Amino acid sequence: MNTPEKIVYTARATTTGGRRGGRAVSDDGALDVVLQAPKETGGPGGGTNPEQLFAAGYGACFQSAMALAAKEQGVDVSGSTLHVEVGLGPEGESYALAVSIRASVPGLGTEPLQRLLERTHELCPYSKATRGNVPVTLVAEQA
């Protein structure tokens, strides 16, 4: 288990109504979104959904961890782009997630980028939280 030595920040949000017509609001009001199930899952669309929020959060966290891994390896990732996909599908009695992270960094070939992604995956808190439970595919792409 990856337990923090000390909590330095706590995010707080209140959710009402779930993924079909619900709402999620952070305690500071910076996040205030209407939640709707996507049309692909039988919902009406027209709002965000938990998978989009997870993809955005994972991407931001992973990119920050990538800067740390890049510093270790002496490479510049300031122009990096990540495309994060969070898939939702049936699993047993309910649903499960699968994640794909595609990355490109100008001037960095796919082999060194793949090594960087693997190291980032060791450092990222979202990766630590999902490890062993959510399949995560890392793909290095040419910029």
Image (cartoon, rainbow, N blue to C red):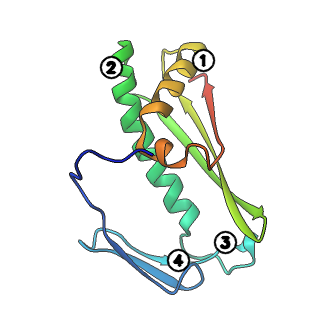
Instruction: Give the vertical position of 104 relative to 93 (above or below).
Output: above
Query: Where does residue 30 sit, x and y in percent of width and height?
Result: 29, 68
Query: Where does residue 9 sit, x and y in percent of width and height?
Result: 23, 55
Three-letter code for the amino acid on which mark 4 is drawn: Leu
Residue in the image at 60% along x and 17% along y: 110
The disc placed on residue 35 is 4
Q: What is the distance, in whole Å, between disc 3 and disc 2 at their CAs? A: 39 Å
Q: Earlier in the sequence, mark 2 or mark 4?
A: 4
Residue hosting label 3: 38
Label 3 crowd bin: few (<14), some (14–19), many (20+), radius 10 Å:
some
Label 4 crowd bin: few (<14), some (14–19), many (20+), radius 10 Å:
many
Judge depth for marks 1 and 2 and give the one in front: 2
Q: What is the distance, in whole Å, between disc 4 and disc 3 at their CAs? A: 9 Å
Q: Secondary structure at mark 1?
A: helix
Q: Secondary structure at mark 3?
A: loop
The answer to whether the residue labelled 4 contacts the one labelled 3, judged by CB atoms less than 8 Å apart, is no
Res. 22 visible in picture = yes
Residue hosting label 2: 71
Q: Earlier in the sequence, mark 1 or mark 4?
A: 4
Three-letter code for the amino acid on which mark 2 is drawn: Lys
Judge depth for marks 2 and 4 and give the one in front: 2
Q: What is the distance, in whole Å, between disc 1 and disc 3 at their CAs? A: 33 Å
Label 1 crowd bin: few (<14), some (14–19), many (20+), radius 10 Å:
some
- Position of 15 with respect to 31 (left or right) is right
Res. 78 visible in picture = no
Q: Earlier in the sequence, mark 1 or mark 3?
A: 3
Query: Where does residue 18 sit, x and y in percent of width and height?
Result: 54, 81
